[in-house]
Structure formats: structure tokens, C-alpha cells
Image: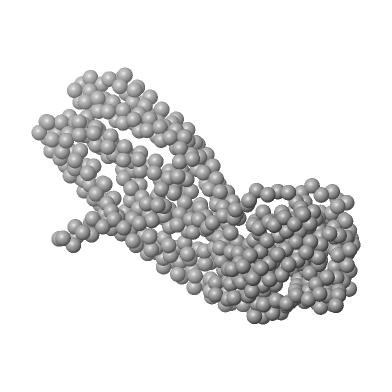
Amino acid sequence: MKQKLKKLFNIFKNWGDTSDYIRWMLRLTSRYKNSIFIMMAISFVSLIISYAGTIIGKYVVDGATTGNLSVRNILYMCFATLISILIGVGSRILGDYINEKFSFGIRAEMFSTIQRSTWQDISKFHSGDLITRLTSDVGSLSGTLISFFPNIILTALQLVIAFCILFYYDKAMAAFALILGPIGALCAMFFRERYKKYQTLLRENESEYRAFMQENLENLTVIKAFQREDDNEAAINEMRKKRLTAIFRSSRLSALMGALMRAIYSLGYVIAFCWGAYRISKGSITYGTLTVFISLVSQVQGSVNGLTNIIPQFYGMLIAAKRIREVSDIENEIYDGKENIPESVGITIEHVDFTYETEKVLSDVSVIIKPGERVGVVGSSGAGKTTLIRLLLALVKPDTGSIHYTVGQGIAEAVTPSSRRFISYVPQGNTLLSGTIRKNLLTGKDDASDDELYGALRMAGAENFVRRNPDGLDTMLSENAGGLSEGQAQRIAIARALIRNRPLLILDEATSALDESTESQVLKNITESCIGCTCLIITHRRSMLKYCDRVLEIYDDGTILVRDNHQ
Ligand SMILES: Nc1ncnc2c1ncn2[C@@H]1O[C@H](COP(=O)(O)OP(=O)(O)O)[C@@H](O)[C@H]1O
Ligand SMILES: [Mg+2]
């Protein structure tokens, strides 16, 4: 007995971070509090009107059984019904509107938080997982959240008012009919751990298969070349089985809970009904009172059925909220507000160590790069060249040591996200977006004229093939620069950086897919035209180092050596 009491008490304990999530959800909805308030007011008025109709009904029945049927009361009843219907239409339209506003609102907000998160933390998530959280989790949260708390309040109000009306006419009948409903809801609390488990499983499962599909669709050529179709289908089937099991268990739990609650509620109804019949046979209540009872029961029936969904809905929301918070809670990057673009930029790196998780990539790196200097960066694949660039772009932070820029007349400026304002960067690999070539180039400078665009393309060795295309700058590229060869895509990416025209230019294996003479021509163009511009050129072709003043070599142990190129 003591054990059972303890267990019952525990239902209200162990909320832990649940209350934190509830507060977060309330904060999200509170921005729409005016609309929600209007919705609730409308629903409340409609509730009162339908109860008024019920009570008028009692007088109609009582009048009829005593031989004075009141036409006026019947008209009142019709009027109440009509008003209810009209209010229903209005509240439905308003409800849909608020729902959509809210749902897209939090979707946009989450997207914006994610894109402003620190790269080091957010890049640990699979993009398929992030998309699932942004669409499916946000969808399932926003779909229920806006109406969840108002619905609970309205249902509670509805039950209380129904109880009071019944209580006024017959106390015992009220007790039988309506006390058992909420008790049923409490029963469902016993199963909350299981609801939580199934919901988590379902969500994780969804992320898993979305990530799987996205990745495989992006790499169709690999799938085909390695003949992975059958294995992929088997993998999908496995995921489907897992999902089916989870869905089956969770829906079995909900169905059982629903049945249990309806059974409890029906028991209350039958007892109250028999009690009413008994009282009529004794002549202590009128037929009208029994009509009030029957009509109230049918009115609250929907809400009581809704109660059976509250617990599963709540855990669905809770798990979605948790998954959204896992990404939206990641620290945002902080810009320090600097916007001036200096004429020249130097780089000072002092005793920098850098480690990803456990792997030490850079070890005691020190180098000073003077403004206007051209530095070639070499090292075997995986040595840490791209990592060095990530440090300069403030995408990651050094474990120890320091990096700062010297801007303009030798003013030191710490590396922060704001430093990106003076960097033109060509990332490693394919980084074009789908859309026209023009759209890609304008990423570098919104208001560039066609002449500027062609000028940059010329420097990047891309003018000819763009002009040869019948659509020119408006040539459409599909995903991953589909429609261009890899070397062509690289040259567009270089032009995009040149258009930006900032004092520090970083090329991360930007010419790796070009033939030697084209690469040489592109680098010659760049180094000749970017006078005063500091350049970091990562390359595997030693012959290209002739365009550099110095060479920075990164060794596999993470140490570096800098040598003068002209000696
Ligand atoms: N996001 C990452 N998380 C963990 N390890 C990484 C990450 N990116 C690169 N590394 C590791 O850091 C090392 C250096 O990588 P990188 O700087 O990309 O080399 P590269 O010189 O070829 O550009 C590699 O061993 C790689 O496995
Ligand atoms: Mg690299």
C-alpha cells in the first residue's frame, strides 16, 4: 500500500527538465497571446451559448410535459443554435490562420538560430537530421502547441460549468457523471514513461531514414556504380520494420488508454442515467432535468474523448521540443559589430594548437603573414590545411595560442565572425548553389553589374565557356553545380570570391580540377590583378608555388615550416 502511494506521489515528481520545456513552449506561444486570447474568448462565448440552449431546452420539455409549450423558448433555442454555428465558422477560419502563422513563424525562427550557431557544434549534426528537426519536429510541435494549453483550459472550464449546471439541478447525478472523467486522465499519467520512450524512438527513426534517403539521393552515381540498390532497399525495409514496431506499440498504448477512459466515463454516464431515471420514477426531478443531463453529456463527450489524447499529444510535443532545443540551444556566433573594410590585412598566428574531439591537427603553429604577401600552403592530404583556414574564418577556435589580424595601419584585431568581412574565400570542393550562374556570382556582391561579373569570370578563366552558353550568365545549374564540369564549377567559385574583392583572398585547393596550364593562367591573373591583397593559396601542385612569396608547409605531426620562396 505504502509502495503504491509512493508511486502515485512520484507521478507529480521527477519532472526535471520537463518543466523547463513547458516554460519554453509557453514562451513560444506567449508571442501569439492576443490571437490565442481572442480564440479562447470566442470558444468560451460559444460554450456559454450552447449551455444556454440546453437550459432553455429544459424549459421547453418541462413546458411540454405540463401542457404549456412555449413557442418563444423554441425560437430562443433555434437562435442559440444559429449563433453557435456562425461562431464555429469564424473560429475555424481564425484558428487555421493563427496556426499557420505560428507554425511558419517558429520554423523560420529555428532556421535562423541554426544558421547562426557556431559551426563547430552544428556541423556535428547530419544535415538530414537537422532537416528532420526543422520540418517534422517543428511541424509536430507547432501543430499541437498553439491549441494545446488553450484546449486544456477550455475543456476544464467546460467540465466545471457542466458540473455546476448539473449540480444545481441534482447533486448526485453531477457527481456520478463528471468526477470519473478526470480520474481517467490521471490513470494515463501512469504510462508517461512509455509514451516518452515510443515518441523518442519514432522521432529518431524518422531522422535516421531521412538522413539515409537524402544522402543516397545526393550520391546516386556512387549507388549505381557500386551497385548498392538492393542493399539500400534492404536497409530501408529494416528501418520500416523498426518504425512499424514503434508505431504499433505506441498506438496500442493510446488505444488502450482511450478505451479505459471511455469505459470509466461511460460507467459514470450509466450510473448517473439510472439515478436520473430512478428520481423521475419517484417524481423528484422533471423530464426536463433529465434532458439537461443527456444534452450536457453529449456536449462534453467530445472534450472528454479529447482528454484521452492529451497525454500522447503532450509527450509528442515534449520530445519534439527537446529535439528542437538540442539544436536551437547551441551557442550563437557573436559579431562584434565592426563593418569597416580595411585596405590591407596581415595575419599573426602564435603558438596555436588545435584538436578536433581527440585528434590533434595543429601543433605549436606560429607564423606572421605581412599585408600583401602571397603565401602558398602545402602539406599532404589530411595534414590540416583546411583546418588552418577554419581557424582564420573563426569557424573553430584554437585550443591554446592566439591568432589576430593586423588591419590598416597595423591595428590588431582579434579573429571573430566579423573578420569574415575582409575575406574572399574559395572553399574546397563543390560549393555552388542551384540556380543561375548569375545568382551564384551575386553571392559575392549583390549589386555587381554584368561587366563586373564578366570581368571576374575572365580572371577566373571562366568567361569563354559562360559566353559560349546560349543563356550566358543566366545558365541554370542544378544541385551540386549539375550542368558544369568540376573544373568549370571551380572557376565559377573563384569568380564568386573575386567579385567580393576583399583584402584577404583564400583559395583552398580551388584549382585542383584544372589542367596545369589553365591553373597557371588563373593564378597568374589573380596574383597580377590583386595588388596589395594578401593571398593564401592551398595547392598540391608545387609548380604553382612560383606565384607565391613564401611557402608554409604543414607536416603530418601538425607542425609547420615557413620558407622564403625566392631563395
Ligand atoms: N569536422 C571535423 N571533425 C573532426 N575531424 C576533422 C574534421 N575536419 C577535418 N578533420 C580531421 O582533421 C585532419 C585535418 O583535416 P583537413 O584540415 O581537412 O586536412 P587538409 O590538409 O587535407 O585540408 C584530418 O585528419 C581530418 O580527419
Ligand atoms: Mg583540405
Q: State which quarter of the image contains the N terminus.
A: bottom left
Residue displayed at 56% across by 48% down = 109
Q: Is residue 198 above or below residue 278?
A: below
Question: Is 480 in front, or is 113?
Answer: 113
Q: Quadrant of residue 298?
A: top left
Residue displayed at 16% across by 60% down = 2
Q: How many marks?
A: 0
Residue positioned most to the front:
410
- Across and down, in percent, residue 496 comes to 78, 58
Q: Quadrant of residue 61?
A: top left
Residue displayed at 78% across by 74% down = 551
- Applied colour scheme: one colour
Q: Is residue 162 above or below residue 145?
A: above
- Across and down, in percent, residue 509 comes to 76, 70
Q: Is residue 567 above or below residue 337?
A: below
Q: State which quarter of the image contains the C terminus.
A: bottom right
- Across and down, in percent, residue 90 comes to 47, 33
Residue positioned most to the left:
282
Question: Is 68 in front, or is 327?
Answer: 327
Instruction: Decide if residue 472 is in sight here.
Output: no
- Across and down, in percent, residue 394 comes to 64, 61
Question: Is 366 in front, or is 33?
Answer: 366
Q: Quadrant of residue 393?
A: bottom right
